[in-house]
Image (cartoon, rainbow, N blue to C red):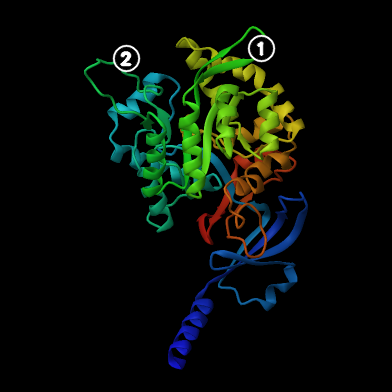
Amino acid sequence: MRSLLSILCCISFFTAQSQKVTVLKCGQVLDVRTGEMSKNVMIVINGNSIGSILPPGALAKIKADTVIDLTAYTVLPGLIDCHTHVLLQGDITAEDYDVQILKESIPYRTIRAVRSCNIALQQGFTTIRDLGTEGAGYADVDLKKSIKNNVIPGPRMFVSTLAINTTGHYPVSEKEYAWELTMPKGLQEITGADEARRAVRQQIAHGADWIKIYADRGYYKLADGSYRSSPNFTSEEIMAIGDETIRSRRKLAAHAVTRDGILAAINAGASSIEHGFGMDDECIALMVQKNVYWCPTIYVNDFVAEGRAKAGSPINQLFAESEPALFKKAMKAGVKIAYGTDIGGYDWNMPESKDFSFLVQYGYTPLQAIQTATINAAALLDQPLLGELKAGNLADIIAVKNDPTKDIQALSDVRWVMRDGVIYKSVK
């Protein structure tokens, strides 16, 4: 027994000693919780975690394997995007969507997703929650595994695999194709509470971290300015999904745009409402009461609005007109917001940082906008070791040239990226 303990102690000592120590000499470091800037400090990284944040004079006492000069930069935590689709490449119209689902193989889409993952990381997003493969099976689980195993570069991923809707309520629509054909769909369809539970269990068995549902469809505006839609699930179906998700110690994300989907999703136990462009006062109050996060995905709505209006659907333009007032109302009420872009719904060649400017334009301070993609997002994901630079947290760190608390556009020019203690983008 003694010899075994000695071996274990030696292994533990060797592991601790073999961790590389990296020191970042920072011009200024942002405390995203308080907004305070610490100038000319050092971040000491042991392996993949932050060991300490020290004044510059302490460098002589540290045996560092690597010292990196970031004195010309503002340093802050890696950003978190809580709504992405790495397996999509933009789908303004139904035709755009159908091309990807029907004409591109899953291996081809996965190869393109490898590129999407690297783009996200290079832009400073060190963690993403990917909300649905849109017909690409469980390829998101493979991508997550490949990143974790250092096969490909990319952000830390939390995945929702297939997403769930009810039969006949999601494209590709059989109405547009010969009825003899059974067309592929962008998600898993269910009918009835038993199938709903089975879908949740199947997705978790295949590696889902989150369960994603599409709670409503067919959005329209009433004469009084409010929005409505058609709910996708019966109460028995959506409650079965929520119950099975929570019983399985997972969380539920709901694509829900108006009260018809939002209220049903929240009452079923959803932790986040995605989009929510047509929510009303009752939705806002219930979100605050039940601590439900909002991922407003502002830019993607603007991006698709014109093209969809030309194709005969003006609803996204109407949402764009009413969303600034909605955002101010939700902000005043205290709705918690987590950064989510829905990128993949727009092209991955476009900046993932677009939504920051909208958040500030609609009433947030730059610091509040940054918090949506750091401490707020980490809280939604139940990841206390992410979203903040402090001792013990994972070394997900980025550097930008200018101060983002003064100019939010600074987040569109990330110069240096570290995820999990590994540098993926270096200062030129």
Residue at point 30%, 28% (across, down): 184
Residue 215 higher or lower than 407, as above or below: above
Look at 47% across and 41% down and name the residue there: 211
Q: Which of marks 1 and 2 is nearer the N terminus?
A: 2
Pick the front one: 275 or 272: 272
User: Is the residue 309 above or below the residue 157 in the image?
Assistant: above
Left/right of residue 63 with respect to residue 368 in the rendered view: left
User: How many other residues sit within 10 Å of disc 1, few (<14), some (14-19) or many (≥20)?
Assistant: few
Task: Please give the label number shown on residue 338.
Answer: none
Give, as a three-letter code, the residue at label 2: Glu
Return the residue at label 2: 176
| Residue 168 picture quarter | top left
Q: Where residue 160 sits: x, y (%)?
A: 45, 42
> Within 10 Å of the Cα at label 2, are there few (<14), some (14-19), or many (20+) other Cα atoms?
few
Q: Mark 1 points at which residue?
A: 225
Say which amino acid is labelled 1. Answer: Gly
Residue at the image position 65 percent from the left and 41 percent from the top? 372
Considering only vertical position in the picture, is 150 above or below 170? below
Q: Quadrant of residue 1?
A: bottom left
- Would you say residue 347 is visible in this rendering? no
Q: Where is residue 391 in the image (x, y as percent from the top left)?
A: 66, 65
